[in-house]
Amino acid sequence: MGNAKGTRRRFGSVRQYRSGRWTASYLDPAGLERRAPETFETKKDAEVWLSQVEADLTRGNWQDPDAGAVNFREYALQWVDERGLSATTDELYRRLLRLHVLPTFEDLDLDEITAPRVRTWRTERLSSTGATTVAKSYRLLKAIMETAVDDELIRRNPCRIKGAGKESSAERQIATVAQVDALANALGPRWRLMVFLGAYGPMRPEEQAELRRRDVDLDQMTIRVRMAAPELTTGRRAPGDTKSEAGKRVVVLPTFLRTDLWRHLDWYAEKGSDGLLFVGEKGKPFRRSTFGRKWRKARVAVGMPDGFRFYDLRHTGHTLATRSGATLKDTMVRAGQTSEKAAMIYQHSDLERQQEVAGGLDDLVRVARAKAKDRPSGADLVRDA
């Protein structure tokens, strides 16, 4: 490019090349010389750039221009490794990265991921992928880049699209008591209790997968939820803690389930106090794929909408419990949910109150069944003494 002649300044220096263009340089806090990444058309442009650098140094906003030269793929995978995530969340994050984020950003350095690139990536994803998946992928990318900001590798998070990480889903459907009974009957004796615990527990599928004989108290009509065993896409179960601390709870069941609970323990549960409550026909832990096929057939047989998931039984349980007189706090305790609202701290729902809720739920279901004159085979209603 040829020699350049320089001009000394109070901060840094500017130099003009024989080509007529200008460059600028300065000493960083470590005493290393830093040169502008590009040349300038005029001396004034070079001096303006130096003034901006000087201002950043004065305000403590200066950032090593080489700090962001970190490969995104390496950084993102390390970010996941360091989170200490549950097995299911770890699997979800790696799948989102592999399928939706890395194909676009894996070859870029952190400082090369700009706001325009993020907007273009999101637009392309929305044209080929569901909005919910895009929102999850965007939130993951934003979280990774926010950590890069905290690590002082980049100055500002490029994920700045308002509302891009929000998910909007249709209101979940609620089953009637008659529909819950019909689904339980359609699935058959081995799985009917699982349907009832999903609706009237209401327990998550992964919580039911880890229930043991010792967790059941027939006299008190309670089930203690201690752990959860979600199934990964590989088919492997990942036993561990419940979704939150609130998930560890004692669920008081309505007494109309006594016969179903007793029969299931007698006919289907593994033997021994540590035996699993739910096992498949071959005596092994049930598989999500196998049960899923049975669930879809039962849903069709009952005439439920295609979008009604087994997990929606929990929503049904929330609604029925509220209708039976439960407060919001009661239903949160029953379902093992948490809330950050300060008002929840001052509301209490102890075992006695949970028994009242279960009693109200018992009355509601009995009345609904009596009105429909629907007494499903294999589940005798327990009459009051």
Image (cartoon, rainbow, N blue to C red):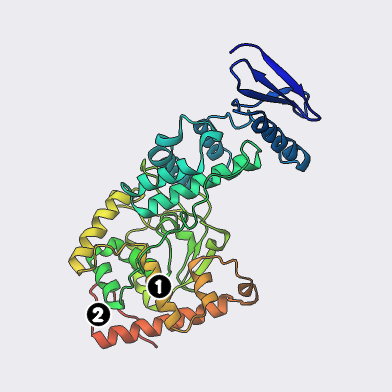
| Relative image position of residue 125 (x, y in whole percent) | 36, 46
Q: Quadrant of the C terminus?
A: bottom left
47 lies above or below 200: above
| Relative image position of residue 76 (x, y in whole percent) | 52, 37
- Residue pictured at 61% horizontal, 38% vertical: 154
- Residue pictured at 44% horizontal, 78% vertical: 321
Mark count: 2
Callout 1 touching callout 2 (CB < 8 Å): no
Side (left or right) of 173 relative to 219: left
364 lies above or below 252: below
329 or 182, nearer to the observer: 329
- Residue pictured at 60% horizontal, 28% vertical: 40
**Residue with the most extreme left position:** 301
* Residue ID for mark 1: 317
* Residue ID for mark 2: 375
242 or 75, nearer to the observer: 75
Side (left or right) of 376 relative to 13: left
User: Residue 339's mark?
Assistant: none
190 or 209, nearer to the observer: 209
Q: Secondary structure at mark 2?
A: loop
Spatial CA distance of label 1 from label 2 is 20 Å
Three-letter amino acid code at the position of disc 2:
Arg
Q: Quadrant of the N terminus?
A: top right
